[in-house]
Amino acid sequence: GKTADEIGLALASEAPIHEASEESASSEHAQTETPDRDDAVDGHFITFVFVDGRLVELDGMMSGPIDHGATTIDDFIQDAAKIIRED
């Protein structure tokens, strides 16, 4: 098989994929209005990642990653969904 880098480079070099990406990224519909510096912002982004057999939550509002315990690549989505439902 190919490495992740090789796959990424192959995808990036495909003209139709590159053109579709550029077109959607530059569309006026794809742009989000940025709040002013003094605006109160209610939401933020978090993500769940699979790291060395662990389910890890990355939340910019926290002081560091949150390790939610062991998981498998097959159970990752279901395990992350359980955590999301708990909150």
Image: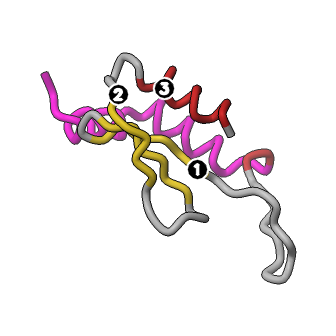
Q: Is residue 40 magenta?
A: no
Q: Residue at x 47, y 30 (%)?
A: 16
Mark 2 or mark 1: which is in front?
A: 2
Q: CA distance from mark 3 to mark 2?
A: 7 Å
> In the rendered structure, which disc, 2 or 1, sits on the residue that comes first in sequence?
1
Q: Position of residue 29 (x, y in %)?
A: 79, 45
Amino acid carrying mark 3 in the image: Asp
| Quadrant where the image shows the N terminus | top left
Q: Secondary structure at mark 1?
A: strand
Q: Amino acid at mark 2?
A: Thr
The Cα atoms of the two marked residues, 1 and 3, are separated by 15 Å
Q: Which residues are magenta?
A: 1-28
26 displayed left or right of 51? right
Residue closest to the eye, 8 or 62: 62
Majority secondary structure in the magenta region: helix
Q: Secondary structure at mark 3?
A: helix
Which kind of residue does numbered mark 1 sit on?
Ile
Q: Which residue is mark 1?
A: 46
**Hey, which quadrant is residue 38 in on the image?**
bottom right
Farthest top residue in view: 74
> How would you rate the neighbour count of disc 2 (Cα within 10 Å): few for under 14, some for 14-19, many for 20 or more?
some
Mark 1 Cα within 10 Å, few/some/many (few <14, many 20+)?
Answer: few
With 78 as the anchor, is 69 left or right in this view?
Answer: left
Q: Which residue position is annotated with label 3?
A: 79
**Image x and y of residue 47, in percent:** 53, 45
